[in-house]
């Protein structure tokens, strides 16, 4: 089990990472929302994991409830998205991670799971439509990137670059 040092003012020497407790087999232990979002923030800011094709972080550093996030997806190679950078907004309400965040492309894009206003439609995007608590914002971004490369999206004509 992962242990982290605590400041002396708390009176304890270490505390166990909530994620480590879940991974150690205490399956009924749920990581609180704020701990989960802090872990995602650290992972997103430090670029831990992944291949660098997606990134994410807080949209508003003053948002103490950690609701507003921004994501970036690099278009997959050998598609109409190749070389393009897409910006998204993710909004995590108080029910996250039990419920998925609302996801909206800030950059204009033509995809089968994205409405004309940029909102990712959960009825057409499985990750949101069949949300699981262990999914993350990184999961959403990686799956959207994979969706860009799918046969029905890889060659769709796209709006001119720079349109928002």
Image (spheres, helix red, strand yellow):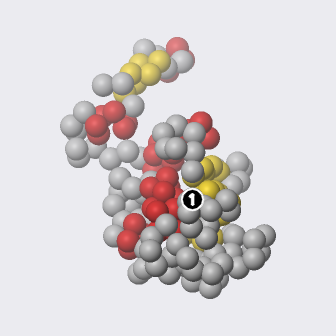
Q: Among all residues in the image, which is located at the extreme right?
A: 162
Residue at the spot x=48%, y=39% of the render? 49
Is 104 rendered above or below residue 72? below
Instruction: Please tell me whether mark 1 sits on a helix, a strand or a loop.
Output: loop
Q: Is residue 87 visible?
A: no
Residue at the spot x=68%, y=69% of the render? 106
For disc 1, the marked residue is 77
Q: Position of residue 57 (x, y in %)?
A: 62, 49
Q: 8 or 40, which is in the foreground?
A: 40
Q: Quadrant of the C terminus?
A: bottom right
Q: Position of residue 53 (x, y in %)?
A: 57, 50
Residue at the spot x=56%, y=63% of the render? 78
Q: Among all residues in the image, which is located at the extreme bottom?
A: 116
Q: 140 or 147, which is in the foreground?
A: 147
Total marks placed: 1
Among the 4 quarters of the image, the one containing residue 12 = top left
């Amino acid at each position: 089990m992962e242990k982290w040092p605590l400041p002396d003012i708390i009176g304890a020497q270490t505390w166990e990472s909530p994620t480590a407790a879940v991974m150690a087999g205490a399956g009924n232990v749920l990581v609180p929302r704020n701990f989960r979002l802090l872990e995602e923030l650290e992972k997103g800011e430090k670029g831990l994991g992944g291949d660098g094709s997606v990134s994410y972080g807080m949209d508003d550093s003053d948002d103490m409830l950690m609701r507003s996030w921004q994501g970036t997806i690099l278009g997959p190679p050998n598609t109409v998205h190749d070389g393009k950078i897409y910006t998204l907004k993710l909004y995590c309400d108080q029910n996250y991670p039990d419920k998925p965040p609302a996801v909206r492309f800030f950059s204009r894009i033509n995809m089968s799971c994205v409405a004309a206003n940029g909102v990712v439609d959960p009825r057409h995007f499985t990750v949101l439509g069949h949300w699981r608590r262990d999914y993350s914002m990184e999961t959403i971004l990686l799956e959207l990137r994979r969706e860009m490369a799918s046969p029905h999206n890889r060659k769709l004509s796209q709006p001119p670059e720079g349109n928002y």
